[in-house]
Image: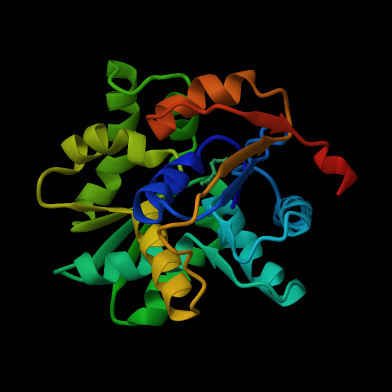
Amino acid sequence: MFDSGIGGLTVAKKIFELLPHENVIYFGDTARYPYGPRSKRIVRNFSFQNTDFLLLKRVKLVVVACNTASAVALDVLRKRYDIPMIGVVEPGARGALKATRNGRIGVIGTVGTINSGAYQKAILRLDPGLTVCASPCPLFASLVEEGYINKEATRLIAHEYLDPLLRKKVDTLVLGCTHYPLLKSVISKVMGKGTRLIDSAEETAREVKSFLEGSALLRNAKQRSFRKFYVSDVPDRFVQVGEKFLRAKIKEVKRVDIDSY
Ligand code: DGL
């Protein structure tokens, strides 16, 4: 799996929980984080390099754990590579469809994710009768990385971003960025009890499991498994912040010269 940096560890966490016997190779593109404000062309090029790196590790499936990369690059990745690829957008959209009662769904994510329209399209493809209200929340990812989880400033910013969605009466909100599950408590306080939060990470892990089962690619419980972490910048910050995302120790992280791929 790959991500723009640390955030994809929320997806890794769910995959580790659901599929403890799988070997997982995680690449976090920390040197080129964030992807959210970048152009489609740049994010696509980064995604090609990240995938080339993973393919050299002879993986059986690539999980595009980054919402921005899934939103703008998954289509071209699937065209370029034969290997199966799962992104976070389609599972998140399916989760929202299952959850909504009034047919009004909100989506939040980076500027790149929201402007691409990927979630909006994925949801409407499932049911054209739904209403989708999408809104970028670009400061959220930085707040999470800086540990601003329970701060007053975060609550104020959350109101700023989310009050318009509240006014549009959405009853379901897709957390369309890897970092947002860490803000679940502040987001649900702003949105109120009536709004269901959809964690794309959770939905994606379930999709990975059902894909592996369906293709007879699931590893058996008796085999020993490994988890390897690679990053494109020095690993210190990845370990420090990443352990909060993963709520577990990150033992070994190697640096990769991603520009050489
Ligand atoms: N992984 C990215 C995402 O889900 C985090 C934000 C970013 O890279 O800008 O969109």
Residue at the extreme right of the image, as rendered: 260
In this rendering, the answer to whether 218 lies above or below 205 is below
Residue at the extreme left of the image, as rendered: 193
Q: Foreground residue, 208 or 141?
A: 208
Q: Foreground residue, 97 or 255?
A: 255
x and y, in percent, of residue 50 in the image: 73, 51
x and y, in percent, of residue 128 in the image: 35, 82
Q: Residue at x 62, y 42 (%)?
A: 4
Q: Residue at x 49, y 37 (%)?
A: 138
Is residue 135 among the parts visible in the rendering? no
Quadrant of residue 55 within the rendered picture: bottom right
Residue at the extreme front of the image, as rendered: 222
x and y, in percent, of residue 232 in the image: 73, 34
In this rendering, the answer to whether 94 lies above or below 190 is below
| 214 relative to 150 in the view: left or right | right
Q: Residue at x 73, y 54 (%)?
A: 57
Q: Check the image and tell me how it is coloured.
A: rainbow
| 106 relative to 179 in the view: left or right | left
| 242 relative to 106 in the view: left or right | right
